[in-house]
Structure formats: structure tokens, C-alpha cells
Image (cartoon, coloured by chain):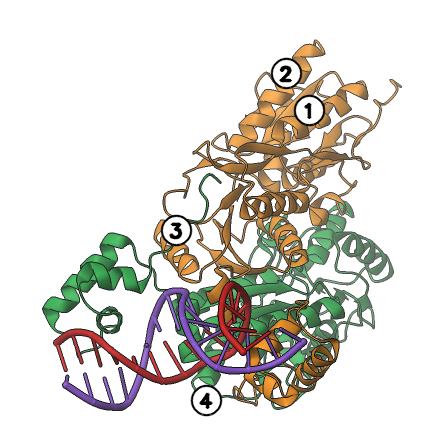
Chain colours: A green, B orange, C red, D purple
Amino acid sequence: MGRQRSRTVTLTDVARLAGVSVATASKALNARDEVAPETRRRVLEAAEELSFQPNVLARGLLTGRTRTIGLLTDELAHRFSIPILLGVENALANGQMSVLLCDARGDAIRRQHYIRALIARQVDGFVVLGDSNDVRPSLIRQIPVPAVYVYGESDDPRDLSVLADDEHGARLATEHLVSLGRRQIAHITGPQSYRAARDRVASLRKVLASAGLPLAGGEPLYGEWSQRWGRNAARMLLSANPEIDAIFCGNDQIAAGVAGAVRELGRRVPDDISIVGYDNWHEFAADCQPPLTTVDLNLQQLGETAVKHLFAALDGQPSSGVVRQPCRLVVRDSTGPRAQPA
Amino acid sequence: MGRQRSRTVTLTDVARLAGVSVATASKALNARDEVAPETRRRVLEAAEELSFQPNVLARGLLTGRTRTIGLLTDELAHRFSIPILLGVENALANGQMSVLLCDARGDAIRRQHYIRALIARQVDGFVVLGDSNDVRPSLIRQIPVPAVYVYGESDDPRDLSVLADDEHGARLATEHLVSLGRRQIAHITGPQSYRAARDRVASLRKVLASAGLPLAGGEPLYGEWSQRWGRNAARMLLSANPEIDAIFCGNDQIAAGVAGAVRELGRRVPDDISIVGYDNWHEFAADCQPPLTTVDLNLQQLGETAVKHLFAALDGQPSSGVVRQPCRLVVRDSTGPRAQPA
DNA sequence: CTGAAAGCGCTTACAG
DNA sequence: CTGAAAGCGCTTACAG
């Protein structure tokens, strides 16, 4: 830690060293054109020599813009939060904006506290990061600046929400399996309380119906987002429905559990049973045995898209409604053509 | 997004509504005692009615304190960053401080850019979050405010670094296996370039030596931090050294891979071979088959400890050197007593 | 082209 | 107990 805060170099110091007024120094540094080239050179030199960093707070007080965004998350610990946050942070940095991070941890009181703190810090706008792609209450009446909702849909139609397109993701997965000639496709997924789980099921059913195929096992198996559930569900499913030749899983952890169970049951992946995961969580999907074909939600892109819209709103071009970010199928070794009958 | 920035309520508005001067309004709101109770009541009422949020920037300009900390990460996407960040964020919020998040993504240029941005935003201090518990260059000459280094040791002894105690973690793991009667303990870990990997090996060797035991296989197997490496290494190791009765793994992914391979080779976990992981990464450790005994680095605590020291520095009580955060052994089903000979 | 002055929203001596 | 005034660091009309 060593050093204590030393006296900060201010524009006054730069002006004095350059032998000009602060007004002129300001203009020179901000590249306004009413400054003589020679004067500007002296000012820039002085600023350089003193390692001058303009005080953004003071500027913010004048301009009313702090170039700071509040990022309010429901649950930062959730696996999806980080890639989205990376996208947000990246896009903001490109626009020379900074991020104030506040994690509500699913606590309403805490969220309220953070909203106040962010407003008091004069953020130019909010990115509100949800935890489940579900509908959530709008903050529109509480915050005086533009906001964009990501991975969680605001219940106020005046707001803009940027969501993962689960209908699209499930369609990609199902069409892939159908195109491989799979005819007995089952579905193991997380809790039915998740809109994401239900949306994917709806899309899966639609694709199967239009291909004239049944949902193997009759109903999707709703459970948990865990390997363990994947293992258990696969055992139940395959003992009751040995004819199954493909399993579309609600996430990669479930898929990893399914893959393990299938192999333990002596069935081959992908020949006998093809498996598709969801999320493209690298540590589970790419490192699975065999590596998983899966759906990538393009989460980082989701964050970048949100910021793009927020920037537009800050420039006076707000949008509203729902933007759905397309998904991407990542094909690996857990899917393939059906084994030839011996 | 709907609404544009509306005119902000300022202290002047509150003062006017309460019928007092801004000076008096300020004192009333800040609970200074030179204000008549009745006056204070009126001011508070007016502030409430107008939903007044004091402008933290303006206050910061006066006091020189922004109550904002810069959190500079090397690589936010790394698995360790999030728990530490949660700890930091939590501890800061308790102190009414906000966090400006900047992720350098391993890019020196980007890091430099962010350092400037944070200084320009007048942060009161820095938390510098490393990506590997390794030694890293100090920022002491670049930043004019206190800084604390977490999960990465500053190379300047005047700085304070808060580190995971890998010597302790590896000791806990090894002593656990020894106490279970294991006599042929092997080690599969990540790249030797990681100080964390080397520190754990050194500690493992020390405990084994003092117990009069060999390191099974002679040398640790350095590789990658992946399941795949765990699987491959376990196969090699067990075919060359069938007498092995325990494997201490450098992380939980390796351990999960090892567990899978051991079971495929027809050996029982934990009876024939006990396995210890490292990190207590819930999705891998708790959900493994069987659930993994592992070392928890107390990462959230690491972040909180760092903030505690940063607060002390901000209060004029800086510390320096290295603080090592103790680890914690989490015992699950992958370790147990040796199987009785049949 | 340059600089004195006003002002962003707030706090803090200081005078009354 | 209350309020006028100065000032934090900067930017921006405005006058010269």
C-alpha cells in the first residue's frame, strides 16, 4: 500500500506551468480549435510532464454526463452473468464509459439500496442484468435515466429488453437431431418454473410436430440444472424407453450427466444415442467425454447489444420492446448419424 | 427505456421547498447538530417529498473522497475472479462504497488505459485482482492512492498482497489422505508454470516426507487444469503404478476426470482409490460421482480481507507484505478408509 | 487567439 | 440557530 494519497495535479497546475489561463489550458487539452498551435503544444507538454489526469467528477458536474453506467445484477454468481457482463464491460470501454457494478444477490432491499447509490453517483444509464430470461418488474418509475434490461424481460413495454432467443436455440438443436435421422428424441431439462425451460420445450415440440415425430417418453423430464439430475433422468428414461436414439438436454451439466449414464449403460454416444447440450459452457461441453454438441447463447454478444441500445438511448434514440439475440449451434462429437444396424 | 433524463432534484430545490438556505439544508441532511429540530424536520420532509438524492460527485469534489474503489482484474472470466469479486463487492457495499469494474483481459495496454480512467474518476483506492496467485508487477508508481493486491502478489514489498495459502491447502489435503491410511499417494495437477501448482507440490512433498511416505509415481504429473488431462493422466499413472491408493488433484476438474477414469478401470472410489480435488468448484465437486473431497480456498473471504485492509489504508493505517488466507478441507465421498483386503 | 467570470451541486468556516 | 460567501476542478459563453 505504501503511499498515501498525494496531492492531485489539477488543470491549474498545468496552466501555470504552461504560462496560460486555465480556460486556455482547458481548450487546448480538449482540442478545441480556438487555440494557437504553439500554445496548445506548451499546454500538452505541461500536462504530460505533470501526468495530468482531468478530474472526471468536475467535468461531470458541468456537463451533466458522468460517462458512467450502473450495472445492476440480480445474481452475479450465476453462470450467465459473467459472459454478459464481459460483453457489457467491453462495449462500454470502447465507448470510454466506466461501469459501476452492483450485485443485488436476489435481495430486494439490497437492490433498492444500490439503485439509490447509483442515482446518487449520477450514472448516465443502467444496464439491468437478470438471472433467468424471465419477466421482471420494471425500474422505470424509480430511475431518472435510460435503462436496458438484459437476460430478463421488463414487464413495462416502454422498456427495452435484450433476451436470449430460446425458441431459436431449441429449434437449432432439434433440427440438427432430426436431420441426423434421429426419430426418438427425448428431452431432459431443468425446473419447469424457468421460462427458458418452457420456451425450449415449446420450440422442441413444434419442430418435432412439423417433422411428424413424437416427443420420446411423452413428456419432457423437468428436474434440476445438474449433472446428477442428468444421470438419474437418463437412467429412468432409457430403462422405460429403450428405443430412444437422441436426448436434447436443457443445459450442458445435464448433458454431461446423461453422457456418463448412457456410457455406463453400455450404449454408445453418438452412435446409439446422440446428445445435445445447451449453453456451451466450455468446462462441461468441450471437456465432456465425448465433447458435446451444444447451443451457444452468444451471451457476450447479448451484453454488447444491450450497450449499443443504451448508447442510442443516451443519444436521444431510445427503443423499446424485446430484442432476441440469435443462438448458434456448436457441433462436436456427441451427435452423429445413427449406427448402422449390425 | 422510455424516459429521458429528467431534471435532477438538487439541494437548492429542497432548501426552497423547506424555506431555508442551502447551507442549512445541507446541515440538516447531514445530521449536523447546529440545526433546530423543527428546521431539520422541514428539510427532511422536503427531501423526502422530492425524492432528493445528493449528488455524490459534487460532494466528492469538496471532500476529495468519492467513496468509490477501482477493481482492476487481470481476467474476469477466470473461475476465481467471481468469488473474490463477490467478496470485494460485498465488503465495499457494507462500507457504503461503490465499485468501478475494469477487466484488463490480460492485455497490458488495456490495463494501462483502465488505470488512467480510474484515476481520472478519482477513485479512493484500488483492488488489483490477479489471475494466478503468482507474483506480478506493482502499480505503486502509477497510482496516487492506496491499493491492495489479491490473488496475485505485488513484487514491491511496500504493497500489501492477500493470497490463497496453497501451502496450507495442500497440507490439509495430504494430511487427510495420510490419516485415512493411504500410503501410495500420487499427484496430478496443472501446468508447472503456475506458482500455485508448484507451491502445492512443495507442501505435499513435505507432508509425505515427514510421514515417511514416497510420492507415488515418483514425480507429480504436471499437465492442464482440465477433466481431459485428469482422465488421461489417471490412466497413465494407474497402468504404470497399480499400487496407488490415493490421488491428490490440482483442481476439481482434474479430479472429476480422474474419478471417471478410475471407475472405468474398475477400481472403486473411495475404497480402492481415494481422490481429493482442489477449489471446491460446486458444479464439479459436489456434483461429481462420487462427490469430491476438496480444498476450499475461501475466495470470497479473500476479497473481504483485501477490502478490510484497503479500508484501513484509507484511514491512514496502511499495511504491507503478504497476508495468506487459510484454506478449508471439505470432506465428501471421494475419500475414505482403505478397502479391507478381500 | 486569450483570459476573466460565471456556474455545475455541494460543504464548511465564518459572521450575524 | 441561520445564511451569505468561498471554493472543490473544470467548461463555456463572452469580452477583449
Judging depth in this view, the residue of A271 and A259 nearest the camera is A259
Q: Quadrant of residue A246?
A: bottom right
- Mark 4 lies on a secondary structure that is loop
Q: Which residue in the protein does label 2 denote?
A: B206
In space, the residues marked 1 and 3 are separated at their CA atoms by 34 Å
First along the sequence among labels 1 and 2: 1
Judging depth in this view, the residue of C3 and A204 nearest the camera is C3
Q: How far from the left and from the top, in percent, is residue A10?
A: 33, 61
Q: Quadrant of residue B86?
A: bottom right
- Disc 1 residue type? Arg
First along the sequence among labels 1 and 3: 3
Q: Residue furthest top?
A: B212
In space, the residues marked 1 and 2 are separated at their CA atoms by 8 Å
- Disc 2 residue type? Lys
- Chain identifier of the residue bearing label 2 in the image: B
Q: Relative to B25, is A49 above or below?
A: above
Could you tell me if the residues under marks 1 and 2 are in contact, i.e. CB atoms within 8 Å? yes
Q: Which residue in the protein does label 4 denote?
A: A317
- Chain identifier of the residue bearing label 3 in the image: B
Q: Nearer the viewer, mark 4 or mark 1?
A: 4
Q: Which residue in the protein does label 3 denote?
A: B107
Residue at mark 3 shares a chain with residue at mark 2: yes
Q: Which residue in the protein does label 1 denote?
A: B171
Q: Residue at x 77, y 73 (%)?
A: A215
Residue at mark 4 shares a chain with residue at mark 3: no
* Badge 2 density bin: few <14, some 14–19, many ≥20, Cα 10 Å: some
Q: How far from the left and from the top, in percent, is residue B206?
A: 63, 16
- Disc 4 residue type? Gln
